[in-house]
Amino acid sequence: MMKSIKLETTNDNSTTKVLLQFDDSLQIESVLMKYRDWYSTCVSVMVGCPLGCKICATGKMGFSRNLTAEEITGQVEFWNDYLKEKGRVSRVVFMGMGEPFLNWEETYQAIKILNKPGKFNIAQRHITISTAGIIPKIYEFIDLNTQINLAISLHSPFQNKREEIMPIAKQYPLTELMKAAGHYVKKTDRKLFFEYALMYKFNDTFEDIDQIKKIFGSKLFHLNVIILNPVDKQCKPSGMGRRETFIRALEKNKISYTVRRSIGKEINASCGQLATQTAPLSHLEAQS
């Protein structure tokens, strides 16, 4: 069903990336990350992506097709085979190529397979879904009443700026997205993560901090601060000084945050860097 075309590992052995090819010759990338005493994998749910976010290399590919549940779980199976006696994958993040909520039927079927005792046996609390903000699917996800973690790509607390880098924001406005976020924490009583890639003079100012404080209406909202891996000339990462100033301002304003560890950059395996050379078959809209 799939075969390994290329395997790359960082010098510190913290991250390994594989290029996988399917029977139809289309390709995806998947990543294995080693932490203290566990392995996590970042899996893909599409060949390419239809959303076209400026800070994501996958978006520049266009969209070819959705992956099946078997193709999604096959990535975890590949990494378990790769690890052999070293260990097994115990955490899965749906932060690879594609938008999970635009291939939700297959993605959720894959999650149920991964969660079953036996072959994979991965706890729901060790699974994270990342979305660009597909609001109807967020409400559907809430109604499932699972222990699966949810992360939303925020990247700016201002609607106009989100639209600049995330075209999908025009369809799903920030005000409505934050309403859905509020509903999530009220119904689940679980922490909700917001991904935030710091960009030079775009979202790293005191004005941004003030606005984040305004829209963060729950103590369960948590900001995951990410070091941007630039894939577009217009989007530049914040320098060390601006990052430190931003983080100190988060602390001063008592905004819950984590600076996410950046690994895999040297092999283009970090956030926003996954992409293949496969030409997309089409730019059809992904199925909702």
Image (cartoon, rainbow, N blue to C red):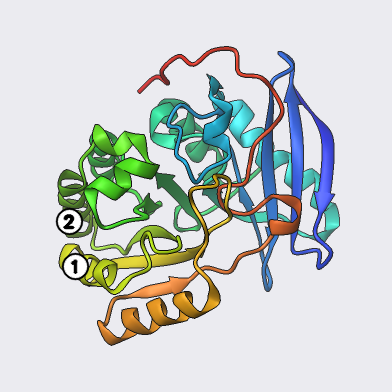
Find residue 218 and name its label.
Answer: 1
Judge left or right: residue 13 versus residue 229.
right
Tell me the quadrant of the picture where the N terminus can be found: top right
- Counting from the top left corner in percent of width and height, residue 253 is at 25, 82
- Counting from the top left corner in percent of width and height, residue 57 is at 58, 40
For the residues labelled 2 and 1, say whether their Cβ atoms are less than 8 Å apart: yes
Judge left or right: residue 112 versus residue 277.
left
Tell me the quadrant of the picture where the C terminus can be found: top left
Please report whichever mark, 2 or 1, sits nearer to the chain's N-terminal start: 2
Q: Residues within 10 Å of mark 1 (few under 14, many from 20)?
A: some
Residue at (38% x, 84% y) in the render: 248
Judge left or right: residue 158 versus residue 248.
left
Residue type, numbered disc 1 = Ser
Residue at (66% x, 19% y) in the render: 279
Above or below for 110 versus 271: above
Disc 2 to disc 1, C-alpha distance = 7 Å
- Counting from the top left corner in percent of width and height, residue 9 is at 82, 54
Q: Disc 2 marks which residue?
A: 182
